Image: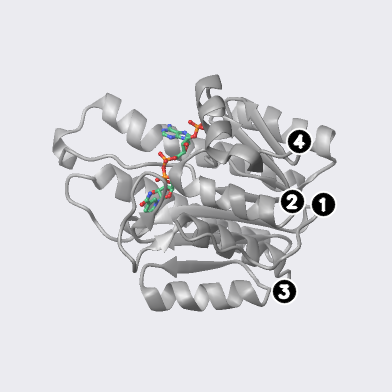
């Protein structure tokens, strides 16, 4: 995987990355660590924490705070945000690559368990983190959600993914409207991603590039909230150029 990180210096900045243990999240965690930030990665299970620590290897520095904590409920996210404020003194940025893929049924074939796992639990996790963190985010801080192009493109037999991602993308747009510039809310809308799990194709964005762009957006305080699409090579090149100059 290409390792490509922004030049931004985020030393002392405190970022929360729920979903950071995932294939896309790994690139975001690596980019923030490379930029010198304090990085909090909550994960729901000790097994996942152990696995992620071994994936990161030596990068698992004392600035990586990998905590086993259920951040996917309103109470759990609230507790996590409060702990971050009391232990680190505040929250500067959030990047939320919470999600995953689901496929195999048309909408009229799903059962309640599918609905709960592919829509309700993920949408709830995003909402729980946003409502817990936004009131505690420093002024000018950034909140970035990561979704797929399926948020605005119907994918037959993966409709629950499209619906959930669309809801999260709208959540970011509502945040932009409600925050009125006090904080910056971004959405990164991804095409297929080259990750530790899927090598992919040369024209796919890599998880490292997603991390670089997330760091670049956070570092550029003059950049207002926005939706950034990373679905074509031109999109990716343009976003990386902006990140380079942040
Ligand atoms: N991979 C791609 O090619 C690709 C392409 C386009 C868009 N995206 C988007 O990028 C985001 C991350 O995708 P990913 O491929 O990195 O997924 P992933 O590898 O499955 O990781 C997602 C992370 O979300 C967390 N999570 C919290 N609640 C969850 C739940 N109810 N079910 C499953 N995971 C849950 C998990 O962290 P813990 O278990 O540690 O809590 C997990 O590590 C998603 O929004 C996805 O749609 C990915």
Some atom of ligand 1 lies within 8 Å of the CB belonging to the residue at label 2: no
Residue 30 in the image: state x and y as whole percent. Answer: 60, 50
Query: Relative to residue 241, is residue 84 depicted above or below?
Result: above
For marks 2 and 1 on the same chain, the one whose residue lies earlier in the sequence: 1
Q: Which residue is mark 1?
A: 12
For marks 1 and 3 on the same chain, the one whose residue lies earlier in the sequence: 1
Q: CA distance from mark 2 to mark 1?
A: 6 Å
For marks 3 and 4 on the same chain, the one whose residue lies earlier in the sequence: 4
Q: Is residue 99 visible?
A: yes
- Depth check: give the residue in front, 201 or 71: 201
Some atom of ligand 1 lies within 8 Å of the CB belonging to the residue at label 3: no
Residue 74 in the image: state x and y as whole percent. Answer: 59, 30
- Please tell me in which quarter of the rendered image ligand 1 is found: top left
Residues at circles 2 and 4 in contact by the CB criterion of under 8 Å: no
User: SS of the residue at dot 3?
Assistant: loop
Residues at circles 2 and 1 in contact by the CB criterion of under 8 Å: yes
Q: CA distance from mark 1 to mark 4?
A: 14 Å
For marks 2 and 4 on the same chain, the one whose residue lies earlier in the sequence: 2
Q: Which residue is mark 2?
A: 37
The 10 Å Cα crowd at callout 4, few under 14, some 14 to 19, many 20 or more, is: many
Residue name at image x 48 percent, y 61 percent: 2
For marks 1 and 4 on the same chain, the one whose residue lies earlier in the sequence: 1
Q: Which circle marks residue 84 in the picture?
A: 4
Q: Closer to the camera: disc 1 or disc 3?
A: 1
Q: CA distance from mark 1 to mark 3?
A: 19 Å
Q: CA distance from mark 3 to mark 2?
A: 19 Å
Q: Quadrant of residue 240?
A: bottom right
Q: Quadrant of residue 219?
A: bottom right
The 10 Å Cα crowd at callout 2, few under 14, some 14 to 19, many 20 or more, is: many
């Amino acid at each position: 995987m290409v390792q490509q990180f922004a030049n931004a210096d985020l030393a002392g900045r405190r970022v929360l990355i729920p979903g950071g243990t995932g294939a896309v999240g790994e690139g975001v965690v690596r980019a923030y660590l490379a930029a010198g930030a304090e990085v909090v990665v909550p994960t729901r299970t000790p097994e996942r924490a152990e696995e992620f620590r071994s994936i990161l290897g030596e990068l698992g520095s004392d600035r990586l705070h990998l905590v086993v904590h259920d951040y996917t409920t309103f109470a759990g996210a609230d507790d996590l945000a409060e702990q971050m404020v009391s232990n680190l003194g505040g929250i500067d940025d959030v990047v939320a690559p919470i999600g995953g893929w689901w496929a195999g049924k048309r909408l009229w074939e799903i059962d309640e368990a599918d609905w709960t796992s592919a829509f309700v639990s993920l949408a709830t996790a995003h909402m729980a983190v946003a409502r817990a963190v936004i009131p505690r985010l420093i002024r000018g801080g950034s909140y970035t959600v990561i979704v797929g192009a399926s948020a605005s493109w119907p994918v037959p037999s993966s409709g629950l993914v499209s619906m959930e991602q669309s809801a999260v993308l709208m959540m970011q747009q509502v945040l932009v409207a409600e925050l009125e510039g006090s904080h910056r809310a971004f959405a990164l809308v991804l095409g297929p991603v080259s990750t530790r799990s899927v090598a992919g194709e040369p024209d796919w964005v890599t998880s490292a590039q997603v991390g670089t762009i997330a760091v670049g957006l956070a570092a550029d305080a003059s950049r207002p909230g926005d939706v950034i699409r990373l679905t074509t090579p031109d999109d990716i090149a343009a976003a990386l150029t902006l990140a380079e100059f942040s």
